[in-house]
Image (cartoon, grey):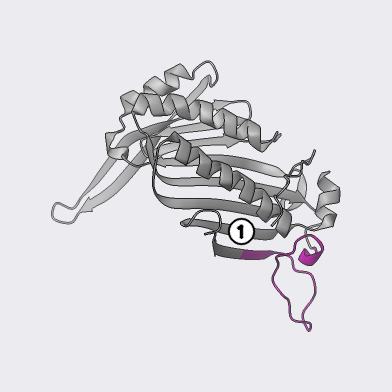
Amino acid sequence: MSEFVRPHYRNAPIAEALIDIRVARPDLVTMEQITLAADQLAERFPVRHPMNTIEFGFDFGSNQTNNSQEQTGLRLECENRVLLLQRIGFTYSHLPPYTNWETLRDEALSCWNVFREATKQSAASRLAVRVINKIPTPEAEIALEDYLSVYPVVPTKLPTTAKAAFVQLQMAMSHVIPTAQAILNIASGHADANGPHLLLDIDLFAAGVVEGDEAIWNTIEKFGIEKDVIFEACITDKIREAIQ
């Protein structure tokens, strides 16, 4: 098989691209460590918000509610980047306008190094790369096959266009790494301030302990290539012309 050549689109329809790393020992991560990492990144991410989990309970014996709230992380923001530092792990998001995979990867790696050093976490229990594409369409009701190579087959006796459609594929991706999987969500009929669009959501992930930065980022790099392979396999030339 020939080596995949990543195309570059000037108008890439990416609404969000993220790298997610779940640490193997979240029980050893403290808010003090997370705050230390956030402080070291404060110049790059001046906006900071707490992330909390809320638990609701009810004691039937005393007929009382038991509610609790715990801070589990920090959300850091700057322009079109979001960084989640949590006890369970690390998520780096690139929002529009999208640049390229190399920028996302290198920025995420730089922030991960700070988080890893502060938390003393060198192993991951889950790795993921996810890209959410919002592909503009001239109208909400379209023939999906004009835009995508993955679509529901509509019986000939029914209308060829639909007001909305949703398809989900869950696939083993063992050719990438043995434990890798992909979830592909395709939806039409959406519209926002920018007009109607198709949603093409590509989520690549693998569970299982991965030790060390080299192994972690080698896997992430493989996912970074494969998400583009999937995207290219799913779209038609009509989309390629629109996003050139």
Q: Which residue is mark 1?
A: 185
In the image, residue 236 above or below residue 220: below
User: Is disc 1 placed on a helix, strand or loop?
Assistant: strand
On the rendered image, what quadrant is the N terminus found in? bottom right
Report which quarter residue 198 is drawn in.
Answer: bottom right
Sort mark 1 into few (<14), some (14-19) or many (20+) by Cα contacts within 10 Å: some
Report which quarter residue 116 is drawn in.
Answer: top left
User: Residue at the spot x=31%, y=35% of the render?
Assistant: 70
Q: Is residue 198 magenta?
A: no
Q: Position of residue 123 (x, y in %)?
A: 37, 39
Total numbered labels placed on residues in the image: 1
Q: Position of residue 241 (x, y in %)?
A: 86, 49
Q: Position of residue 51 (x, y in %)?
A: 41, 34
Work out whether residue 13 can be spotted.
yes
Depth order, front residue of 94/107: 107
Depth order, front residue of 94/50: 94
Q: Tell which residue pokes out farthest to the top in this image.
A: 43
Q: Amino acid at mark 1?
A: Asn
Which contiguous range is marked in magenta?
A: 142-167
Depth order, front residue of 14/62: 14
Secondary structure mostly seen in the magenta stretch: loop
User: Residue at the spot x=60%, y=58% of the render?
Assistant: 184
Q: Position of residue 21 (x, y in %)?
A: 45, 40
In the image, residue 81 above or below residue 22: above
On the rendered image, what quadrant is the C terminus found in? top right
> Is residue 217 left or right of 143 when viewed as pictured?
left
In the image, residue 40 above or below residue 103: above
Q: Is residue 150 magenta?
A: yes
In the image, residue 114 above or below residue 127: above
Q: Tell which residue pokes out farthest to the left in this image.
A: 61
Work out whether residue 138 can be spotted.
no
